Image: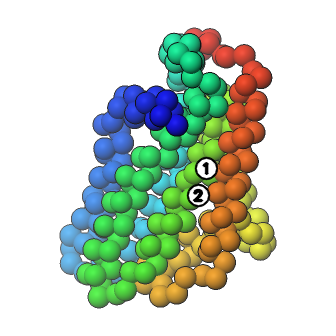
Amino acid sequence: MIKAWLIAKRLLWQNRWLFLLLALWPYIMAAILTGGGQPDPDDVLWMLHQECFAGLALVAFTGSTLLGNEQRSRRIIMVLGRAVSRPQYLLSLLITAWLPLLLYASGFVVSGIFMAQSLHSPHGGIWIMLSAQLVLGIWAGAVSIFWSILLPQLIASIASVALLGLAAYLGGLGIIGPGRLILTLFETSFSAGTVPSSLSIDLLLTLVAGGAWFAAAAWIFNRRDLNLSAD
């Protein structure tokens, strides 16, 4: 875990300005929405749901591109040559894809609570959206890393986002796990007063699903040659 964190820290530092801008994005949107006075509740809810989608897309796109970038730059050879196993290396990529979401989600919570207070409304739903977003981020990161091993970066990104849509469709059919958690994320109001009874089981199953995708990615990565082409 220590080795994975050291690698992730270097990768995060390389993209620090992009991640800083993303961390500020919820505050910027809140300032725009409240700049003209008290915002419309529907506009606030729409914006919060869009930010939830943007957070998951951030993880999916980041996870889909990290491995390809490392292979093209050949930094992966140096890293794996320092007694770092391939699963540890993939774990560092997952950490790199997920930690910016944690920073982004902190801005999501602060700005969301601020807007809820400006509407004199409770903000219990924001905490539900936060928990769903962070757990789904782990699952989305594992999925995107899986596809990045098998597919080129652009196609891996498309496949990862498409799987989010497929999961949401399956959730609409009542299938528990990531799909139903996605629906909970996008159907929860910022003023929700009660926690859905299915939330705990969906959070747990989504973590298990994320672990399964990561285990499959590590198994395949251990058995594939590195793609060090300059394309």
Relative to residue 129, is residue 215 drawn left or right?
Answer: right
Residue at position x 27%, y 58% in the image:
28
The amino acid type of the residue labelled 1 equals Ala
Q: Residues within 10 Å of mark 2 (few under 14, many from 20)?
A: many
Q: Nearer the viewer, residue 231 or 99?
A: 99
Verify CB contact (< 8 Å) between mark 1 and mark 2: yes
Count how many numbered circles sit on residues in the image.
2
Side of 126 where 26 appears, left or right? left
Q: CA distance from mark 1 to mark 2?
A: 6 Å
Residue 202 at what x, y percent from top left?
Answer: 67, 68
Q: Is residue 65 visible?
A: no
> Who is closer to the viewer here, 7 or 169?
7
121, above or below 67, in the image: below
Disc 1, SS: helix
Q: Quadrant of residue 114?
A: bottom left
Q: Secondary structure at mark 2?
A: helix
Q: Residue type at mark 2?
A: Leu
Where in the figure is residue 149, as x and y percent of width and height?
Answer: 68, 30
Q: Nearer the viewer, residue 6 or 103?
A: 6
Q: Is residue 211 visible?
A: yes
Q: Position of residue 200 (x, y in %)?
A: 62, 73
Q: Which mark is residue 140?
A: 1
Q: Which mark is residue 136?
A: 2
Position of the C terminus by quadrant? top right
Picture residue at 48% right of the left edge, 84% below the top: 192
The crowd level at tag 1 (other Cα within 10 Å; few <14, some 14-19, many 20+) is many
Residue 20 in the image: state x and y as whole percent.
31, 44
User: What residue do we see at 30% from left, 84% from top?
Assistant: 119
Compared to residue 31, the image places residue 3 above or below, namely above
At 38% from the left and 74% from the top, the residue drawn is 44
As drawn, the label of residue 1 is none
